[in-house]
């Protein structure tokens, strides 16, 4: 347990010497996996995010994908995401009225040994902002560790996800799309308990602390997030 706590502090200590502002947020992530046959699985996700000390729903993300099992713990996925920002002018977050399309490709690898489960997820996504011709490509990699306690539905999870922009874009002012610079984009680090339920313990609820450090074009943002994820498997 001490190793988990130490790792969480290391992952969440993304201290960058730049102008930053902080926020306290709440993210809710609802996931569903649908087993189509032995090799194919469909996926759906709904994720509202509440900003400005969790006062309002600033972002809503919808995502869907189809995946095929390759073997030896590997699976390949292709999907599409759609994100919207809600317009609110009386906060530190500027009004955007922005819509973003996110087609993506993904490679997932899972390994289990005893009570441990390790997952590596590499995703290549293209961010296309509506009403503007420029698009950004982003690579993101998540490493996750999970330890499930013996004869218990409880587990503890630690994960970290690193985001990297492969190109810079400077959209038109009229489009309200963000300016993105090539290089480090953001980092997310999470620690929290998980609870498994269902006839085969196939469903899960996970809730805990996530640090989201975003490297912006003009200033950085450090968000302290309470994140709850519900995962259902059918």
Image (tube, rainbow, N blue to C red):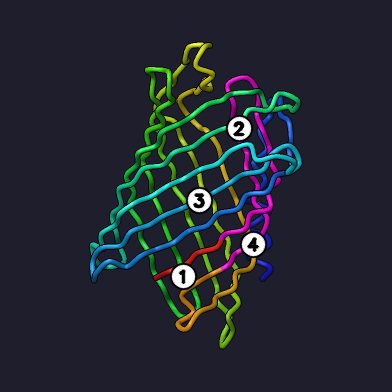
Residue 25 image position (x, y, % from top left): 70, 44
Q: Nearer the viewer, mark 1 or mark 2?
A: 2
Q: Are marks 1 and 3 in contact (CB under 8 Å)?
A: no
- Residue 86 badge: 2
Residue 232, image x, y percentages: 47, 67
Q: Which residue shows up at 65% across the image and 29% down it?
A: 220
Q: Quadrant of residue 81?
A: top left
Which one is nearer the viewer's eye here, 59 or 112?
A: 59
In depth, the one of 6 and 130 nearer the eye is 130
Residue that label 1 marks: 117
Element type at marker 4?
strand
Disc 4 designates what residue?
A: 207
Which stretch is magenta? 205-229
Residue 115 colored in magenta in the image: no
| Foreground tag (3 vs 4) | 3
- Residue at figure coordinates x 39%, y 69% from the top left: 111
| 10 Å crowding of disc 1: few (<14), some (14-19), many (20+) | some
- Left or right of 219? Residue 233 is left
Most common SS among magenta residues: strand
Residue at screen point 53% across, 22% down: 178
- Real-space Cα separation, disc 4 to disc 2, in angstroms: 25 Å
Give SS at disc 2.
loop
81 to 9, vertically: above or below: above
């Amino acid at each position: 347990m001490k190793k988990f706590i130490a790792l969480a502090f290391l992952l969440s200590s993304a201290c960058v010497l730049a102008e930053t502002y902080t926020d306290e947020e709440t993210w809710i992530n609802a996931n569903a996996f649908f087993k189509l046959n032995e090799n194919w699985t469909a996926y759906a996700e709904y994720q509202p995010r509440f900003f400005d000390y969790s006062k309002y729903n600033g972002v809503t993300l919808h995502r869907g994908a189809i995946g095929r099992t390759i073997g030896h713990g590997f699976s390949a996925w292709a999907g599409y995401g759609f994100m919207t920002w809600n317009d609110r002018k009386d906060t530190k977050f500027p009004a955007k009225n922005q819509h973003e399309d996110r087609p993506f490709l993904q490679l997932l690898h899972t390994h289990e040994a005893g009570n441990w489960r390790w997952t590596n997820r590499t995703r290549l996504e293209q961010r296309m902002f509506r009403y503007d011709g420029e698009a950004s490509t982003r690579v993101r990699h998540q490493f996750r560790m999970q330890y499930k306690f013996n004869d218990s539905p409880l587990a503890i999870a630690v994960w970290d996800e690193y985001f990297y922009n492969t190109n810079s874009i400077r959209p038109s002012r009229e489009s309200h799309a963000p300016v993105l610079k090539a290089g480090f984009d953001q980092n997310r680090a999470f620690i929290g308990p998980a609870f498994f339920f269902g006839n085969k313990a196939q469903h899960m609820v996970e809730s805990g602390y996530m640090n989201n450090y975003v490297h912006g074009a003009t200033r950085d943002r450090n968000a302290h997030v309470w994140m709850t994820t519900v995962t259902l498997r059918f």
